[in-house]
Image (cartoon, coloured by chain):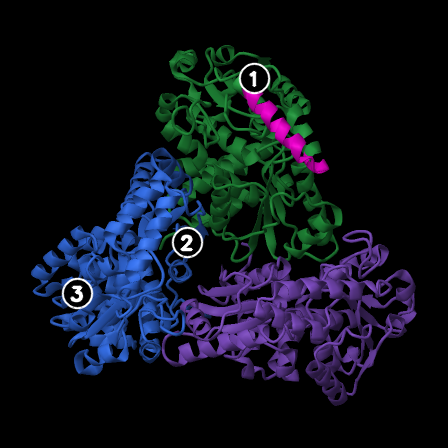
Chain colours: A blue, B green, C purple
Amino acid sequence: MDMKQLQDNLARLGAVDASSMVGDDFLLTWEKSDAELDATFLTADILRGLREANVSSRLFDSGLAVSLFRDNSTRTRFSFASACNLLGLEVQDLDEGKSQIAHGETVRETANMISFMADVIGIRDDLYIGRGNAYMREVSRAVAAGHHDGVLEQRPTLVNLQCDIDHPTQTMSDTLHLINHFGGAENLKGRKIAMTWAYSPSYGKPLSVPQGVIGLMTRFGADVVLAHPPGYEVMPEVEEVARSNASRSGGRFTRVESMAEAFADADVVYPKSWAPFAAMEKRTALFEEGDTNGLRALEGELLEQNARHTDWEADEELMSRTRDGAGLYLHCLPADISGVSCDKGEVADSVFDRYRVPLYKQASYKPYIIAAMILLAKFADPAATLAGLLDSGQKRVR
Amino acid sequence: MDMKQLQDNLARLGAVDASSMVGDDFLLTWEKSDAELDATFLTADILRGLREANVSSRLFDSGLAVSLFRDNSTRTRFSFASACNLLGLEVQDLDEGKSQIAHGETVRETANMISFMADVIGIRDDLYIGRGNAYMREVSRAVAAGHHDGVLEQRPTLVNLQCDIDHPTQTMSDTLHLINHFGGAENLKGRKIAMTWAYSPSYGKPLSVPQGVIGLMTRFGADVVLAHPPGYEVMPEVEEVARSNASRSGGRFTRVESMAEAFADADVVYPKSWAPFAAMEKRTALFEEGDTNGLRALEGELLEQNARHTDWEADEELMSRTRDGAGLYLHCLPADISGVSCDKGEVADSVFDRYRVPLYKQASYKPYIIAAMILLAKFADPAATLAGLLDSGQKRVR
Amino acid sequence: MDMKQLQDNLARLGAVDASSMVGDDFLLTWEKSDAELDATFLTADILRGLREANVSSRLFDSGLAVSLFRDNSTRTRFSFASACNLLGLEVQDLDEGKSQIAHGETVRETANMISFMADVIGIRDDLYIGRGNAYMREVSRAVAAGHHDGVLEQRPTLVNLQCDIDHPTQTMSDTLHLINHFGGAENLKGRKIAMTWAYSPSYGKPLSVPQGVIGLMTRFGADVVLAHPPGYEVMPEVEEVARSNASRSGGRFTRVESMAEAFADADVVYPKSWAPFAAMEKRTALFEEGDTNGLRALEGELLEQNARHTDWEADEELMSRTRDGAGLYLHCLPADISGVSCDKGEVADSVFDRYRVPLYKQASYKPYIIAAMILLAKFADPAATLAGLLDSGQKRVR
C-alpha cells in the first residue's frame, strides 16, 4: 500500500461514523451495521499500511489483553498476540482448562478478577453448540457490571475469537482478502461465492466458519451458495440471517446438495468440512450428561457418515468448473490435504499448492482485523487517531 | 479519585521517608516500618489515581519481572502481571514444577540465571510450612550476592506473593480497602476486626491470610479478634507479632473460640477457612519423607476434623450481630459459598451476594499494592517520581 | 564498563562492515566472517554498557519474537526473553510439542502463520542428529519465501538457540567471556583451550557445545585441544571445520584421549559430558522407526559406556595441572557436580564452587549476544544505531 492509498483510506474512514462501536464487543458480524463493518475493513487496511510504512501503532502505553482459549489454537493465538502487540497491549493468558463449562457467579467473579487492567478480552470457545457465544455474553455482562459498579476502571472489549455460531475475525479477514482481491467491496456484487462442505477424516469440526461466511458474505450483493450433503445442515437461524442479508443487499442465498453445482462458474470457493448442527447439539447434551459411551458412539456414527462423502473434495476437475477455471480458492487453514495431511481430504494437493500464496495472504489479514476491532471499541474518531499516528512520525523499528 | 486528592496524596507521600525500601524486598509486613507501610498505601492510591486520569505509569522502558508460582493461581498471577505491565515490566514465568522443594546451590544458580535483566521476582510458595518464606530469603540472598559479585547489573526486588507465613500483597490490599472504606487509616483505631475461621469442605488451606491479617491489622489501633475452634491454632510466633503490634499501636489482640463472640459488634469480619498449623507442620514432614500413605491419612483426619465445625459459617444471623448489623464482610476470594460452590461452606449465599461489589473492590487494590511495592524498592523519592509522571502528561491510552 | 570504553567500542564497531548480516540468520558460527563475529562481540559489549549506563536499547516500538523450544530450557529461554525485551520485542512461545519432527509443507505453513508480525524466531532443536539445524533452514526458507511473495511484511531473522550441530549463542557468550577475561580477542592467540569430555551419569547430552567450541575458538589463533575417551567422537565435519580454522588463524587443533594431557598447562578448560555422535545417529534412526525397545537398549549401552569413564572428572588434582594451577574453568551450566547434583559427575564440588562467580559471569553474556545477533540482522549501520540510543538519552529506568 502506498501513501496515497493510505491517505485515501483515512479520508474514507473519516466519512464513516463508527462511534457506535466504542465500548462495545465484536461477537457476531450480523450485529454490526454496514458502516461498522466498513470502518473495520478500512481500519485494518490502514493499520497494515502504517506498519508497511514503519509507523508505530502503539496506542496503549500499557494495558493487558486477556486471552482465553478453550480449544487449541496456534494461528488465532498468534494473530491475537500480534494485534495486541501492534497496539501496545500485553497478552496474558487465562488457562481455565478446556473441558469445563463455567457458569454463573464463577464467570462473573473470574471475569472481574482478570480485568482490573484489561482493555481487551479475546475468547475462543467453539466446542459446544449453545455454549460459546452465550459464555462470551456472560463475560461481557460481568465486566460491564464491574465497570458500572466502580470495580473496573475500564470496560474491557470482548473479541470473539471463534464461537459455536460465528468466527468473525476469520470471516472478516476472508472478506477483506476478497475486497482487496477484487478491488473493492462494491466489486463483490454479483460474484458467485460457494461455501461448500468438504470431506475430512476427522470429527466434529466447528460450524463457525460456514455459518460466519454465509452470515457475512451475503451482505455485499453476492450470490452466495451453501453446498453440503443432506444431513450436514448448519444452524437454521444463521441461514435465516443469510437469507435476510441477501434480500437487503440485492444478492442471493441458495442451498444446493452438490459440490459441482456450487462450483459451477463460481468466482470464489470455500470448501471446508464441518459437523452437522444437529449432531453437535446432541454432543453438547451428551457431554453435559457425562455420557462417555454416548459420545464415543456419536463419534463413530459421524465418522461413518463423513465416509459416505469422500467425493466431496476440491479437486482439479471441480476447480476447472469455476469461472474461467480460475475461481479463487479460500480456506481458513489448516486444510486436510489429500495425500499430504491425510489419505483423502478436503482438497487435492495440486489445488492447494497452486493457491498457497493467496491462502497465506488471506490469513495475513487476521492480526489487522483483530487490531481494528479493538481500536474501534476504544477510539470514537478512529480516522483522527490513525492520522495522529502517521503525523507523529513515531517509527515501529527505529 | 479527583485531581485534588491525587495532589494531596502526593504531598503526603512527599512527607514520608521511605528511602529505606530501596533495594529491599517485601516479604513480611512486620518487617516494615509504619512509614514504609504508609508509603506503600499512598503510592498504591496515587498509581490508581494516575491510571484513572489516563496518565501512564511506565517507569521502566524495558525490564523483566520474573514470576514463580509454586501453587496454582489466577488472581495473584493477573494482579502481578497487571502491576508489572503498569510500570513497563514484562512478566516471564519460571515454571519449576510444583512438587519440588529446591535447595542450596540449585536455588543460587537458578536465581542468578533468570535475573540478568530482572528488576523484580514475584514468588508464591505457600504449600509447605517452614519452606516458602525460607525459599524466598534464599533467592534474595542469591541475587544480592550475584549483584555484589558483578554478575547481575541490578538486584531484583523480591515480592512475596504468598508464603507459608504471610500474604502481604493480599493483606495490604485488604487494609487499603479498609482505609478507604473508613476514610483514613486513623479511622481504624478502635474498630473491631474479626478474623475468624470458617468451615470448608476442602483440605489444607494456607495459614498466610489469617496470620497476615492479625500481623498487619493490629498496627492501626484496632481491636483485632482471632476466632477459631480449638485445634485450629495459627503459628505462635505470628500471634506474638500481633500481640506486640497491638500493644504498641494502642489496640487489642484477643483470641476467642466462638464465631458469635467474634462477630458481636464487629466493624469488619473476615471469615475464612485454614488448616491447623500443627497439622501443616506434620504434612511438610510427611511430604519430605515421601510418605504418601501418611499424607492420605492426614488428609482424612483433617477433613473429619473440619466436618465437626460446619456451623462456623458466616450466615445472616451472625452478620446481624455485627455493628448495626452492617459490618463489612471481607474475603480474599474465592470463597466457599454454601449452596453455590459447595453444599456447606464459609459463607451463606445471600451474605456473599450482598457484599459482592465491595469484595471485588477489595480485590481491585492488589495490582496497585504490588506496583507500589516494586516502585518503592526502586525509586528513592517516590513522590518526585510520581509527580514527574503526572507532569510529563504521557497518556496511558493515546 | 565506563563511558570511555563504550565510546571506544562504538568507534571500533564503526570501523567494521557487518552490513552483510542484515536480513540473514545466525545458525552456525563458521558461516560468519571474522568481521561479523567481531561486530557481534562489540555490539554485545556496547549493549551491556548502555544498560549499565541506564540507557534504553528499545529499538522496536512493537514486534514479536517467536520462540520455539523443542527441548526443556530455563536458561536459554530467559536469555532469549531478556534479549528481546531489551530491544523492545515481545516473546510469543510456539508450543508444538517436543516429540514431533515436523516436515515439509507443515513447516512452511506454520512458519508463515506465526510470522506476520515476527521480527525474530529463536529455535532450540537439539534432540536429533541431522534434524535440528535442517529444521531451522527449512523455517528460514519458508519465511524468506513468505516475505518474497508478499505474505510477510518483514523477513524474521532466525537465531539458533541450540541445534544438533552448534550452539552459537552459548559459544559466542563463552568466547566473549574469554575476550573480556584476557583483555581482548588478540590475547587468545596461543592460549591453550581444552574442550574435554567429562563423566555424567545421565544420557544423551547434546554435542552442540563441544562442536560449537572447537568450531569457534579455533578462529583466534588459540591452541585448541579436544579430549575424550575413545568412542566419544564428535561429528567429523565439525572437526574438519576446527582444523581448517586453526590453520587459517595460525592456531592449532589437536585431539587427545586423556584429560590430564588436555589440562596440562591449559589456560582454559571446558570439561563437559556429551554423547557419542555415532550413537546419536543411531538414536535418531531408532526414534524415526518408533523402535522403543531399541531406544531403551541404546540408553542402557550408553550409560554403561559412560560408567567406564567416571575418572573423567575435573577435580583439584587436574586443575592443579593447568597453567600456574589457575586455568579458567568454563561450563555452559547446569553442571553435574560430584556430591551435589549427583554422586559422581563432571566436576568436583570444590572446583565448581571456586569458579562460581566467573561461571555466572560467563552465562551473563548470553542475553547480550542474542540481542546483538538480532540487532545486526536488522540495522545496517549498528554503530550509528547504537550511538543514536546513547545520544537520545532515553533512560531504561526513569
* Chain ID at mark 1: B
| Front position in the image: A195 or C304 | C304
Residue A148 lies, in percent from the top left, at 30, 36
Give the labeled residue for mark 2: B394
Give the labeled residue for mark 1: B228
State the SS at label 1.
loop
Crowd class of label 2 (few under 14; some 14 to 19; many from 20; radius 10 Å): some
State the SS at label 2.
loop
Frontmost of labels 3 and 1 is 3
Residue A282, above or below C153? above
Quadrant of residue B339 in the image?
Answer: top left
Left or right: where does residue C378 sit relative to residue B116? left
Quadrant where the image shows the C terminus of chain B: bottom left
Quadrant of residue A387 in the image?
Answer: bottom left
Mark pair 2, 1: CA separation: 50 Å
- CB under 8 Å between discs 2 and 1: no
Left or right: where does residue B272 sit relative to residue C365? left
The residue positioned farthest toward the bottom in the image shown: C248
> What type is the residue that disc 1 sits on?
His
Q: Residue at x 77, y 66 (%)?
A: C330
The numbered disc on residue B274 is none
Frontmost of labels 2 and 3 is 3
Mark pair 2, 3: CA separation: 59 Å
Residue B308 lies, in percent from the top left, at 54, 16
Residue B198 lies, in percent from the top left, at 50, 21
